[in-house]
Image (cartoon, rainbow, N blue to C red):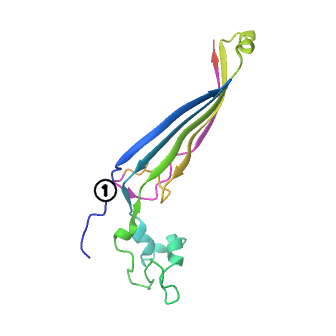
Amino acid sequence: ATRQMFGNNKPKWTGGLSTTISFYNFELSALAGFSAGFKVYDYAGPTNWSDDGYSSTYIHERKLLDSWTPDNTSSDNPLLLQGIKNGSNHSSRYLHNGNTLRLKNLKLAYNIPTKVCQSIGAKGINVYVQGENLFLWNELGFDPEVSTSGGRYHYTWATQRTYIFGLNFKL
């Protein structure tokens, strides 16, 4: 096959949105980010199709269950044949859309009324619950902030989801 360029591993667009909404003593803040217009290569994709003894660890791949057969001619996945590297060569078939949307931070806080704070000698008390990395959406489920191998996806785990409960005192 002829070698061709099939896109770029650098996003054309990146951005984010930060907002804070206050209602009486409650405060809700959020931070979301996105990147779009780039491709990611599933570098382990060919390994999932190889017949080299290593592929048995990847047998869970749904693609293997949807291989081309005479009864399943509409499949995009090649016919599996023992000992033949069908589908295991590097190819654009393992190139995926890299568009990503992430909810990076969400925080809900409550400011205790001033009279209550003053009665215990504080200028202010803030109680909050916060979540980080609560939502990640993209085609492959990879985390582009962790996958730093030049646009190649190596089954990298997403950034850890964190929940924080806190109490701030102003003295």
Horizontal placement of 43 versus 141: left or right?
A: left
How many numbered callouts?
1
- Find residue 55 and report its horizontal and vertical position in percent: 47, 73
For residue 145, say whether it is visible.
no
Please tell me which residue is depicted at 51% across the width and 85% down the height of the picture.
72
Please tell me which residue is depicted at 34% across the width and 74% down the height of the picture.
89
Q: Is residue 38 above or below residue 119?
A: below
Horizontal placement of 20 versus 35: left or right?
A: right
Q: Is residue 140 above or below residue 20?
A: below
- Find residue 52 and report its horizontal and vertical position in percent: 42, 77
For residue 60, say whether it is visible.
yes
Q: Is residue 159 above or below residue 95?
A: above
- Find residue 87 and report its horizontal and vertical position in percent: 39, 77
Please tell me which residue is depicted at 64% across the width and 18% down the height of the picture.
169
Task: Indicate whether residue 150 is drawn in magenta.
Answer: yes
Horizontal placement of 46 versus 122: left or right?
A: left
Q: Is residue 152 above or below residue 68?
A: above
Q: Quadrant of the C terminus?
A: top right
> As drawn, which residue projects farthest toward the bottom?
70
Q: Amino acid at mark 1?
A: Asn
Query: Splitting the image into 4 quarters, where does residue 106 fall?
Result: top right
Q: Secondary structure at mark 1?
A: loop
Q: Mark 1 highlights which residue?
A: 8
Query: Splitting the image into 4 quarters, where does residue 42 fall?
Result: bottom left
Q: Quadrant of the N terminus?
A: bottom left
Identify which residue, 90 or 29, lies in the foreground. Answer: 29
Task: Indicate whether residue 71 is drawn in magenta.
Answer: no
Magenta span of residues:
149-168
- Find residue 150 and report its horizontal and vertical position in percent: 33, 53
